[in-house]
């Protein structure tokens, strides 16, 4: 039966280390003998479940490490592990955009915020944002080239926990002007990564405000 050196086995599961902790977790689960240097591939699925429950993978990026540490503060019994590759990172999955969106969702969740309204942006950027957010947030995405009434703008801001005006995108003044003065956050970044990072920063500031 095929087997692998334990280091290669862990990397196949997406973990670079710490190897002693990974090894101990599998020993405690009865999946390996502490004296053996190799492990059978038929244990791959079972090992993946054990390690997924015990560890949170993060790449070496400082922001991913910081986000993982914040998440672990609310997850007793879980520990931080280093991802084998960027794509294995539970924070960013190798994508700066995905990492930024996850950080934004986590920040909003810390305040119990679940509804985000974005004013501006192209249909393609709206589609990507919906894909990245998934079911984590409710989104209301306002096209920046379609006329909006003040009544509609007020309804949007009342509905949302956070409303942002995405200023560097497709956004007519006749639309953005309806939202100014309604407590919206103005964001000048063009990409989704910049949008998410600015929303996260705004929410973090709100969370520490007296």
Image (cartoon, rainbow, N blue to C red):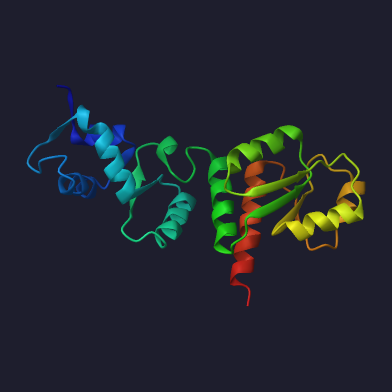
Residue 179's place in the image compared with 169, above or below, is below
Q: Residue at x 14, y 43 (%)?
A: 30
Residue 210's place in the image compared with 193, above or below, is below
Task: Say left or right for 204 vs 93.
Answer: right
**Residue 35 in picture, x, y percent from top left:** 7, 41
Q: Quadrant of residue 151?
A: bottom right
Residue 9's place in the image compared with 24, above or below, is above
Q: Quarter of the image for the C terminus: give it.
A: bottom right
**Residue 157 in picture, x, y percent from top left:** 78, 58
**Residue 91 in picture, x, y percent from top left:** 47, 46
Q: Residue at x 86, y 52 (%)?
A: 152
Task: Say left or right for 186 vs 55.
Answer: right
Q: Quadrant of residue 26?
A: top left
Q: Residue at x 14, y 21 (%)?
A: 1
Residue 189's place in the image compared with 208, above or below, is above
Between 203 and 30, the one lying in front of the other is 30
> Given the current orientation, which residue lies at the most extreme left position?
35
**Residue 8 in picture, x, y percent from top left:** 24, 32
Task: Say left or right for 197 vs 69.
Answer: right
């Amino acid at each position: 039966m095929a087997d692998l050196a334990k280091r290669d086995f862990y990397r196949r599961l997406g973990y670079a280390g710490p190897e002693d902790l990974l090894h101990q977790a599998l020993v405690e689960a009865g999946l390996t003998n502490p004296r053996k240097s190799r492990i059978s591939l038929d244990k791959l699925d079972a090992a993946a479940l054990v390690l997924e429950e015990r560890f949170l993978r993060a790449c070496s990026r400082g922001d991913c490490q910081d986000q993982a540490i914040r998440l672990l503060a609310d997850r007793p019994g879980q520990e931080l592990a280093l991802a084998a590759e960027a794509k294995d990172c539970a924070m960013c999955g190798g994508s700066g955009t995905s990492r930024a969106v996850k950080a934004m969702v986590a920040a909003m969740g810390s305040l119990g915020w679940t509804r985000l309204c974005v004013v501006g942006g192209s249909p393609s950027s709206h589609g990507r944002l919906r894909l990245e957010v998934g079911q984590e947030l409710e989104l209301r995405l306002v096209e920046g080239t379609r006329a909006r009434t003040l009544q509609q703008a007020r309804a949007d801001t009342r509905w949302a926990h956070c409303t942002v005006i995405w200023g560097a995108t497709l956004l007519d003044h006749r639309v953005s002007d309806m939202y100014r003065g309604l407590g919206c956050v103005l964001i000048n970044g063009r990409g989704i990564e910049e949008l998410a990072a600015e929303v996260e920063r705004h929410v973090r500031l709100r969370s520490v405000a007296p």
